[in-house]
Image (cartoon, grey):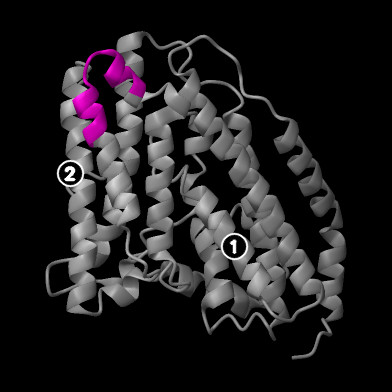
Amino acid sequence: MSGTITSGIKLSLSLLALGVLSGCQSTQNANTAKAEQTSHLSQSVYQVEFDAAQHFAAQTTQLSQAFTDYCANPGDAAELKSAWQQTMQSWMALQGQERGPLDALEQNWNVQFWPDKKNTTGRKMAQLLAKGEVVTAEQLSTQSVTVQGLGALEWLLYDTASNMDSNSNSCQLGVAIASNLHNKAQIIANAWLSNPWAELDKTAWYSEYIALLSNQLEFSMSKLSRPMGNIGHPRPYFSESWRSKTSMQNLKANLIAMKAVYLANGKGLDHLLRERGHADLADRVLGDFDDAIATWPMEDSLFDMLSTRKGYQSVLSQYNKLEELKYLIHEEVAVELKVVIGFNSTDGD
C-alpha cells in the first residue's frame, strides 16, 4: 500500500493541527484535574467515577492522535486498532450509567450507539463516505449519533466496506470522528469535576448507589441477552463490537469496573455491609464478582461463541452468574439497607 496521501487529506490534517494541540492541552488538564473533596458518604464512589471519566478522556486523546498519525502515514493499522480497543475498554467503566451528572449522561448515545438492531451504523457510515465530503468534528457533532462515536470508528477500522488503508475519505472521516469523540469525553470528564451526590441524605445516597450498580449490571446483562435471543435462535449481530470480535473483552471490563464501584477503595458498599454486621452477604456479593471475572470465557467474540452449542451454553452460564449477582444487589443488599429500587429502561427487555 502506498504511503502517499492526497492533498485534500494533507489540508484536512493541517486544519486539524489546532484541534490536536487542544487535545494535548485536554490531556494535561486530565492529568492535573482534581476531584472535588467532600466529607459526604458518596466520596469514595465519586472518586472511582471521577478517575474513570478522566481515564476515558485521556484514552480518547491518544486515539485521536493515533488516527491523525496513521492518516499522515498509512500502513499497518495494528497500533491504531489497539488504541481504539483501549478506548473502548475505558468506556466500559462508564457505560450503562443512569446515575451521575446530567451533562455526562447526555453524552452516552454520542459516545456509543448500541444496540444497533438494523445495522444503522453501517448504512449511515457508507452513506457519509459516499458523499465524499470533508467533514469536521464540529459538523459531525450535529449529525446522527450512529456516525459519531466508538461504533462508527469500529466500522472504519474493521468493516471491509471502509477500506481505510486505501480510501483517503475513510481516513479523514476517522480523524474527525475521533476528534469529536474526544470532545464528548471531555464534556463527561468536566461533568465529574464535582460530586453530583454531595447534597443527598443517607437514605437517598444508598438508593442512588445501589441503583448505579444495578443499572450498569442490567445493561451488561442486556449485552448478553439481546444476542442470545431465544434458545436455538441467537441474534449474533446484536452483539456489541461484533466487527472487532471484542464483545467478551468488553463485558469482562464491565465486571471489573463494577467491582471497583462496589468496593470503592475499601469504603464502598462492601465495607458498609460488613460494618452493619452483614459480612456473609458482603462475602457472597464479592464472591460472585470474583467468580464471574475468574471464570470469564477466554474467547473474545460473542458472535463466534453463539454459533456453537457449547459456546451458547458458556454464554448462558455467564449470564446466569450475572443474574445471581443482580439478585443479591437489587434484592438482598437493597433490603438490608432499606432501599427500594424502581424499574429502569433495561427492565423487561
- Residue 149 visible? The answer is no
Q: Which residue is mark 1?
A: 84
Q: Nearer the viewer, mark 2 or mark 1?
A: 2
Q: Residues within 10 Å of mark 1 (few under 14, many from 20)?
A: many
How many labels sit on residues? 2
- Tell me the kind of residue under disc 2: Glu
- Tell me the kind of residue under disc 1: Trp
Q: Under tag 2, what secondary structure?
A: helix
Residue 186: x and y in percent read 65, 41
- Residue 116 visible? The answer is yes
Q: Is residue 89 depicted above or below 302 in this figure?
A: above
Q: What residue is drawn where x is 43% and y is 25%?
A: 266
Residue 254: x and y in percent read 40, 48
Q: What residue is drawn where x is 41% and y is 33%?
A: 261
Q: Is residue 156 depicted above or below 107 in this figure?
A: below
Q: Is residue 278 magenta?
A: yes
Residues rendered magenta in the picture: 271-284
User: What's the mark number on residue 324?
Assistant: 2
Q: Is residue 226 magenta?
A: no
The chief SS type of the magenta part is helix
Residue 176: x and y in percent read 69, 61
User: What's the mark number on residue 190?
Assistant: none
Q: Residues within 10 Å of mark 2 (few under 14, many from 20)?
A: some
